[in-house]
Amino acid sequence: MPNLFQSIKNKTGDVVNNVRKSLVHNNSKRGSEPSDCPDENARLGKNDFTLSFDARAPQPSAASGMKFERVYKLSSNVLGSGAFSVVKQATHKNRPNQSFAVKVVDRKNLTEEDEAALLDEVAILKEFSHPHIICLYDFFEDPKTYFLIMEQMSGGELFDRIVAKLYYNENEARNVCKTVLEAVGYCHDNHVAHRDLKPENLLLSNEDDSEVKIADFGFAKRVFVPNSLTTQCGTPGYVAPEILEGIAYDTKSDMWSVGVILYILLGGYPPFIEKTQRDLFRKIRNGEYEFHEEYWGAVSQEAKDLISSLLTVDPSLRLDAKAALRNKWINFDADELAKKDLGTNLQEFKKFNAKRKFRAAVKSVIIVNKFKSLGDNFENDLQ
């Protein structure tokens, strides 16, 4: 198999420079002068996702030329950490009552590939404005550090919320699936493939279960031509077969991941489970899964049909987001679906989530190298 990363490495330097120029250019185009007025900033915040990037950035923003430290105050509260970054809670000097999650990235440890991915993520999120996609408010950079001012997702992970429930039914699963499909559809309509949809990237902005948002666009890539992506990336268990096969792909790869997530939401466990990654990849490539009667016997046939239409090995036959949203189950009567109890499956869900959280705890650094996300033995596992 050819070197998976060679073409990326050859082009990364140009990508970093072009994206940085684009970011600077977009900042310089902001028409209005930054405001220090607390009253003006106070009217923003609750529905920032409906605003353009320029409008939702608290003022003064990075466009003012002011340094991050003069505008934001970082707290000692660490919300998360990665290989080259730490996420801390912060407040803007003119929005003291609103907390932000600031991703602080140490530039000196970034490879060119990492930097290109980060700047690509920023460029994409600057253009995005959707109620179910995490909001990027601003972006600062200095010679040593990048600062991504993000929406704080205080509700935690969606799956953690689900397993804390005493009762769980199909209507709740359907509502989550519909929300995810709408957000993924927005990405695709804007020519972006997320490429790493998984439970860890489905977060809640508050205590309301309906406030689900897609996060972590570190793998996201623009797609203007069908089957034009070639980088093999993603997370084992959720990655589409065409990515494992090493053939060109596009936004349809995300729809496979949505199918995996929906299977878990309804069944309580993943469709593809194997002890070794090699066997896992073999099952994914062949589309080998089943609806076990014990857990799926009472689940709506229409829901299973939707999953089957998403977990289709041939991406040309796989549903896109628009078609999935037209599925009969997605549009079923809420009261009828609420009668379909998933209590037995919820117990399996709790077991699966506990294992998932344990693995995440063992791997304290989830992604060490963005371009080896499928594992150090990826090529061997494909044999």
Image: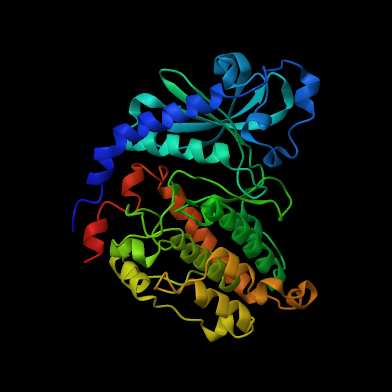
Which quadrant would residue 241 be assigned to in this image? bottom left
Q: Is residue 221 above or below residue 305?
A: above
The answer to which of 34 and 72 lies nearer the viewer is 34
Residue 55 visible here: yes
For the N terminus, the quadrant is bottom left
Q: Give the left or right position of residue 123, taking residue 160 as reference.
A: left
Q: Residue 79 or 337: which is nearer the viewer?
A: 337
Residue 71 % position (x, y): 62, 17
Q: In which quadrant will I find the C terminus?
A: bottom left
Spot occupied by residue 126 in the image (x, y as percentages of width and height): 56, 36
37 relative to 99 in the view: left or right: right
Give residue 183's quadrant in the image.
bottom right
How are the residues colored? rainbow
- In the rendered view, would you say 35 is above or below 114? above
- Kindly identify the residue that appears in the image at 41 percent across and 46 percent down: 366
The picture quadrant where one finds residue 12 is: top left
The location of residue 158, given as percent across then percent down, is 62, 55
x 64%, y 71%: residue: 326
Residue at left offset 27%, top offset 57%: 378
The residue lying toward the viewer, choosing from 103 and 192, is: 192
Residue 90 spot, x, y in % from top left: 62, 26
Above or below 364: residue 13: above
Q: How many marks?
A: 0
Residue 111 visible in this rendered orientation of the protein? no
Q: Tell me what residue is drawn at x 47 percent, y 39 percent.
A: 121
